[in-house]
Image (cartoon, rainbow, N blue to C red):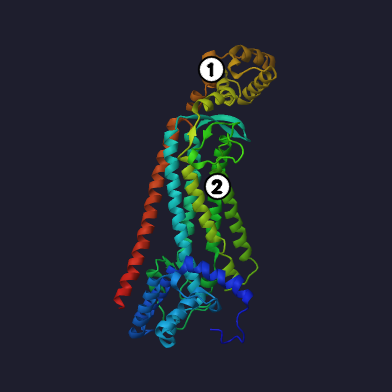
């Protein structure tokens, strides 16, 4: 293989480049690489490029190598990569003259481009299934807590009352968009570069469509140079995962601060908490801390891949093919861990309903609805009402008054002082506006937190979720059928 070169590989090159790469490939790529070998060989035999006699001999040896497993494969780092080690094993079994025919009409460039796309497809399918699992979990929680009132926050300050169901519905809408992006990234990955050769295709009469079908790809790449030069699907996948993890991060952060003593409205289960080595009273929500951190690892993978794909030629090179995907596989693992941990954590959570209701009743988050009531009842403009209620809230803070002390007399006094006219609203209507539960139920506008409207949101979310689940099932069935097609095709070559 190194006939062009006059010296052996440097030990440093072996230690820092080839040994770690081969080991990671052995664990991640062996099965898919063997499938690529078999599909390519089947096509060569079908097209008459390799004889049936040679093809059957190679196929039998490939099956033996695959059945033996990657762990038993003899590795020589001087051979540079996993493929050449598999090829060497094949040569030892059937001889150079026969084994050497397997590589007809292809290059390591399009071989590895195909294997990387298959690995990516496997990883993204797993993430898609996890995303569906998370959405189903959140739908259940949203339905269970559809009526549970809490204070919504803007700028980390009490804003208006909503419900836990409304909050989870918001997260679900974001995750629905994440799945749409993930689905697109999966489709972009699932295109075959096999047959692109080193960069300029091949003069052998290969059948690219056949190998694409056998390997479960939905199409072939239409330009051979693009086939080996493009890894933008990796950037797209990482970008999608980064957006997804941003949503997971924000969800976990909310749960994290809600579990503090200062908020005290959420408690995670003991099974997902840890203790202190010195403070016996501690119950630390550690899973939420790890989840937040894992989103940073995915972002780092985006930065790494982007840097590796910048300032390089549009062709094959090691920084593109070898280095740009290095942290992509780690990112897939981090996403898996984060999703499984957030699901596990949320399934153990308890919400302090009474505490949430009491806080929403006393932190002035309901006065926006009171301002709206004055507009409807007194016929003043919303800006006037906003000024009046703002004045009253400031007055009550200065005089250390609670929200329960806000009454019709104070409104009459303040309106007379500010606008020169007395505005009267019944005390019953004031109390109704300031009640968090009735306050929420008044927000019946589309997208609002009223329980009936949240149920409408959840019905639509569930419908879309079932559609996405059906799409995912079809993808897995297609993947299964392609594997069956490859197995059947191989049997026909025996």
Q: Position of residue 236 (x, y in %)?
A: 54, 59
Residue 244 placement, left or right of 455: right
On the image, which quarter does residue 255 sit in?
top right
Q: Circles 2 and 1: CB distance less than 8 Å? A: no
Does residue 446 sit above or below 121 in this rendering?
above
Residue 291 marker: 2
Q: Position of residue 315 (x, y in %)?
A: 58, 73
Q: Secondary structure at mark 2?
A: helix
Residue 352 marker: none
Does residue 90 sit above or below 474 in this rendering?
below
On the image, which quarter does residue 360 sit in?
top right
Residue drawn at (60%, 19%) of the image? 403
Q: Position of residue 234 (x, y in %)?
A: 54, 62
Q: Position of residue 88 (x, y in %)?
A: 47, 80
Residue drawn at (51%, 53%) of the image? 335
Residue 382 seen in the figure: yes
Give the position of the C terminus as an image quadrant.
bottom left
Number of dots carrying numbers:
2
Rate crowding at label 1 as few (under 14), some (14 to 19) or many (20 or more) other CA atoms within 10 Å. some
Q: Earlier in the sequence, mark 2 or mark 1?
A: 2
Residue drawn at (62%, 35%) of the image? 156
Q: CA distance from mark 2 to mark 1?
A: 41 Å
Does residue 6 sit above or below 293 in this rendering?
below
User: Toward the viewer: 345 or 404?
Assistant: 345
Nearest to viewer (mark 2 / mark 1): 2
Residue 431 marker: 1
Rate crowding at label 2 as few (under 14), some (14 to 19) or many (20 or more) other CA atoms within 10 Å. many
Q: Secondary structure at mark 1?
A: helix
Residue 221 seen in the figure: no
């Amino acid at each position: 293989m190194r006939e062009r070169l006059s010296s052996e590989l440097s030990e440093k090159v072996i230690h820092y480049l080839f040994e770690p790469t081969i080991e990671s490939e052995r664990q991640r790529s062996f099965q898919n690489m063997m499938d690529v070998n078999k599909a390519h060989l089947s096509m060569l035999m079908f097209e008459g490029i390799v004889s049936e006699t040679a093809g059957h001999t190679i196929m039998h040896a490939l099956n033996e190598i695959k059945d033996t497993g990657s762990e038993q494969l003899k590795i020589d780092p001087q051979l540079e990569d996993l493929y050449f080690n598999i090829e060497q094993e094949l040569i030892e079994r059937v001889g150079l003259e026969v084994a050497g025919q397997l590589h007809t009409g292809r290059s390591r460039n399009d071989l590895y481009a195909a294997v990387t796309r298959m690995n990516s497809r496997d990883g993204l399918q797993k993430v898609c299934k996890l995303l569906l699992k998370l959405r189903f979990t959140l739908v259940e929680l949203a339905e269970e807590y559809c009526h549970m009132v809490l204070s919504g926050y803007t700028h980390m300050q009490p804003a208006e009352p909503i419900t836990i169901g409304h909050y989870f519905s918001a997260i679900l809408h974001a995750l629905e968009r994440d799945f749409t992006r993930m689905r697109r990234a999966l489709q972009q990955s699932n295109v075959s570069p096999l047959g692109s050769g080193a960069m300029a295709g091949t003069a052998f009469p290969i059948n690219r469509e056949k190998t694409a079908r056998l390997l479960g790809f939905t199409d072939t790449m239409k330009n051979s140079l693009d086939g080996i030069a493009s890894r933008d699907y990796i950037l797209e996948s990482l970008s999608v995962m980064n957006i997804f993890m941003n949503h997971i991060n924000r969800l976990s952060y909310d749960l994290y601060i809600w579990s503090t003593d200062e908020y005290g409205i959420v408690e995670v289960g003991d099974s997902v908490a840890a203790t202190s080595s010195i403070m016996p009273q501690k119950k630390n929500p550690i899973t939420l801390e790890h989840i937040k951190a894992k989103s940073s690892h995915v972002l780092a993978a985006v930065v790494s891949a982007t840097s590796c794909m910048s300032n390089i030629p549009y062709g094959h090179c090691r920084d593109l093919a070898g280095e740009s995907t290095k942290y992509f596989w780690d990112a897939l693992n981090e996403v898996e861990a984060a999703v499984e941990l957030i699901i596990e954590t949320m399934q153990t959570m308890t919400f302090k309903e009474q505490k949430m209701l009491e806080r929403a009743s006393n932190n002035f988050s309901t006065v926006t609805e009171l301002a709206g009531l004055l507009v409807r009842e007194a016929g003043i403009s919303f800006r006037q009402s906003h000024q009046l209620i703002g004045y009253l809230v400031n007055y009550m803070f200065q005089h250390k008054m609670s929200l329960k002390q806000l009454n019709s007399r104070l409104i009459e006094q303040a309106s007379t002082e500010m606008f020169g006219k007395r505005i009267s609203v019944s005390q019953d209507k004031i109390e109704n506006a300031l009640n968090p539960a009735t306050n929420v139920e008044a927000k019946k506008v589309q997208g609002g937190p009223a329980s009936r409207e949240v149920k409408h949101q959840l019905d639509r979310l569930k419908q879309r979720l079932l559609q996405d689940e059906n799409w995912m099932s079809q993808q897995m069935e297609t993947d299964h059928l392609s594997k069956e097609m490859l197995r059947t095709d191989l049997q026909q070559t025996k």
